[in-house]
Image: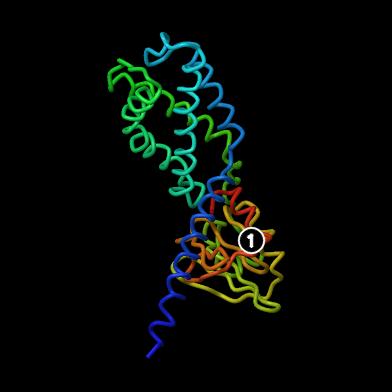
Amino acid sequence: MPPVAVRQPATKVSAKHTFANQVRAFVNRAWSLPGGRITGAVAAAAVMFTTISGAFQTGDMPILPRTLFWSVLIGWNTILWRCWFAWRVRKPQDWWQAAALGTIVLNLPIPAEVALLSRVMGGQIASTWPAIWLYAALISVALVPVIALALPAPPSEPYAFTKGVLWRAGARQASDVQAVVAEDHYCRIFLHGERSTLVHARFSDVVTELLNADGLVVRRGHWVAAGAVTSVARQNRKWVIEAAGQKLSVAASCVSQLRRSGWI
């Protein structure tokens, strides 16, 4: 009978809806990455420089087609870089590894992009592939100061605890703490080595002690260290963080802060 026939369309619609949500979430993440204005300014400056200098032997092209050529090429690669970072970066320390790997992965197809774009515009650029890769590598190196300017300021070095709630819980420095979860008038402190302990304390007081730690409040009564995060995923309409053996849904009011910090 019909059970299978009735459920099948619903499953297809659900799968499409889930895929659309994932695409939308990825686009939002790429759009909200830090450094958008700085990256745009650098891309515009690169278009002006390459157009005026006639890089890749484009100096013989009329000024308007040459400007269009570089605007499309650099604009496309700027979008690719933002999508790449949106895919590869889940926590602050991921930025530099993503930049180094992207220099190889994203620069490999650039000679083919140049050749294709020149044909579309009715020209033929004679530059060799090694020369194009060299230019691309130099542009990638220029991304390093851009990333450095765009990233949020790193937290101060974790300090040693000599007293206080966290010291009583067994933590000796801020990096020992993986997560904090409020439980009525108590707080459960998750430490390295899959240990946890329950202490009588206000959540706000514990978070104050963790001001120098690299972590964020992800919802009311829940603080998570960046180093403890093992995954960040979109489930239905919410972001879910897995850290210290816990799965925590992110409050809507905390999403923007997580984006600014490069977590999502």
Residue closest to the far top: 60
Question: Which class describes the residues within 10 Å of circle 1: few (<14), some (14-19), or many (20+)?
Answer: some
Residue closest to the far bottom: 1
Residue situated in front as seen by the camera: 21 or 32: 21
Residue situated in front as seen by the camera: 12 or 164: 12
Where's residue 203, x and y in %? 69, 68
Where's residue 62, x and y in %? 47, 11
Q: Is residue 54 above or below residue 139?
A: above
Where's residue 132, x and y in %? 34, 22
Going 38% across and 84% down the picture, which residue do you hit?
A: 4
Please name the amino acid that badge 1 sits on. Val
Q: Is residue 182 above or below residue 74?
A: below
Colour convention: rainbow
Say left or right for 51 vs 260.
left
At numbered mark 1, what does the secondary structure look like: helix, strand or loop? strand
Where's residue 45, x and y in %? 55, 21
Residue situated in front as seen by the camera: 38 or 152: 38
Going 61% across and 69% down the picture, which residue do you hit?
A: 168
Say left or right for 110 vs 189.
left
Residue situated in front as seen by the camera: 139 or 210: 139
Quadrant of the frame with the N terminus = bottom left
Q: Is residue 29 above or below residue 132?
A: below
Quadrant in which residue 184 is drawn: bottom right
| Number of dots carrying numbers | 1
Quadrant of the frame with the C terminus = bottom right
Residue assigned mark 1: 217
Going 51% across and 67% down the picture, which residue do you hit?
A: 235
Going 32% across and 33% down the picture, which residue do you hit?
A: 109
Q: Is residue 200 above or below residue 24?
A: below
